[in-house]
Amino acid sequence: MDGDLFIGGGGAGYGAPQHLRLDHANRHGLIAGATGTGKTVTLQILAEGFSARGVPVFLADVKGDLSGLAKSGSADLRLHDAFLKRAGTIGLDLQYSAFPVTFWDLFGEKGHPIRTTVAEMGPLLLSRLLELTDVQEGVLNVAFRVSDEEGLPLLDLEDLQALLVWVGQNAEDLSLRYGNVATSSVGAIQRALLVLENQGGAELFGEPALALDDMIATEADGRGRVNVLAADRLMASPKLYATFLLWLLSELFETLPEVGNPEKPVFVFFFDEAHLLFDDAPKALVDKVEQVARLIRSKGVGVYFITQNPGDVPDDVLGQLGNRVQHALRAFTAKDQKELTRAAETYRPNPRFDTGEAIRDVGTGEAVTSMLEEKGVPGVVERTLIRPPASQLGPITEAEREALMAASPMAGKYDARLDRHSAAEALAERAAAAAQEAERAEAAEVELAREEREFRQARRWDGGSSGGSRRIGGGSPVAEIGGALTSAVIKELKGTTGRRLVRGLMGGLFRGR
């Protein structure tokens, strides 16, 4: 099976060597098991295998251990003897190697900053991130519609906050166009944005936004780039973590072209701590994930969910995961036993052993595996010794990380945040222009009042200097006064005040333009 990924094998009591076929690697996969059973090492050896075959990957480093992918394993490791012994047992010629790693970090501390814009995130995912109600999500959708219609780009949280202020101020007019826009809902969204900002979520939004080509890349030697997201701090905000990964997955789905059934994936995406994506998720969001998982494989993207229990993944999504590595599940309670039985039922049975017992009994670094075979048929479940990694097991030092970041092709590209003209600036300019217009209107009204006073004084002078009314051409006093008043009104309509009155009559037709 040249070119396929060697997962592991075994000796007495174990099955045949297990390989992940590259032409079926975009059929997605699952890595499951209790804490401490070896899921992280399995993720590491899969990332190594894909990279070595020219497939770029993305993974989140939840515990900080996966930074070791950037450094070659060493014979000085305390696990070296154990690694050599396992390699001999499974028939592996173990060769240590480092891999081309690019570090990313939403907070810009342990990797290059990674950002997207509020507009690219969209109202559905943003509502999930902010945990909005259906009514509040509806108001947020109105805000996004206004952004499009008014030409107000939403790039960062400041833009969205400014736009929501405008929506609140114009709630009555917007309610007539889009349905009820309650100012209380606007206030609730603003409070949720404040909480997100206090959690550091503002760092996610802005420019320069991530270019996917910087992730989907190969090095000069042909190996795929390994994109490692530093997620140890990010995990303190699990909704932010899950929403960001789902956004990235959605961007891959919407951006990449159709490639059919490629010989190897274009990109492989590992979604660690997958239960965070589905906990309390509304049905609309789960349906979106299921749709993406079902369709994104035609774009050459393989998605691998990593979680403690297969039951953490909804059945509609679980049914899309063809390649599976199941580490040990512990059955300490009746509920645990039911979940173990349910997990065992999802595998194609092997007459040599009971799948449920095998899942319960496998040790650390062992797994029950099932890989897709010819024509995408699930393979018979096997007990497997997982191969040891070629890169370092465990994290690298901070000095080593900083040196790799300085030498990275991404160095400097995303470091400086951009703040171009967008919704916040445009709305501030509109407010300033409105204030100036109000000042001009007030000044025009003062001028009008002054001219009216002068007109009255002139009329009194004309009628009172000789004790009667002055007549021109034999006209009546009323006609003379009416003519003078008409002249004054025409004069005002031609001047600044007149133009202001016309705007007052007609401006409502063009408000907000």
Image (cartoon, grey):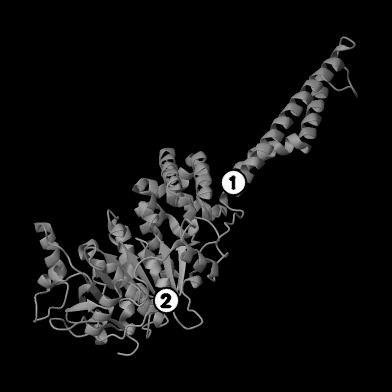
360 lies left or right of 404: left
The residue indicated by pointer 1 is 427
How many numbered badges does the structure rendering display?
2
Residue 465 place in picture, x, y as percent: 89, 12
The residue indicated by pointer 2 is 98
The residue carrying pointer 1 sits among few (fewer than 14), some (14 to 19) or many (20 or more) residues within 10 Å by Cα, namely some
Q: Report which quarter residue 351 is drawn in.
A: bottom left
252 lies left or right of 319: right
Q: Is residue 24 above or below residue 505?
A: below
400 lies left or right of 513: left
From the image, which quarter does the N terminus lie in? bottom left
Identify which amino acid the numbered label 1 is placed on: Leu
Q: Is residue 253 above or below residue 508?
A: below
Identify which amino acid the numbered label 2 is placed on: Ala
Residue 256 place in picture, x, y as percent: 45, 74
Q: CA distance from mark 2 to mark 1?
A: 51 Å
Q: Secondary structure at mark 2?
A: loop
**Residue 59 appears anywhere in the view:** no
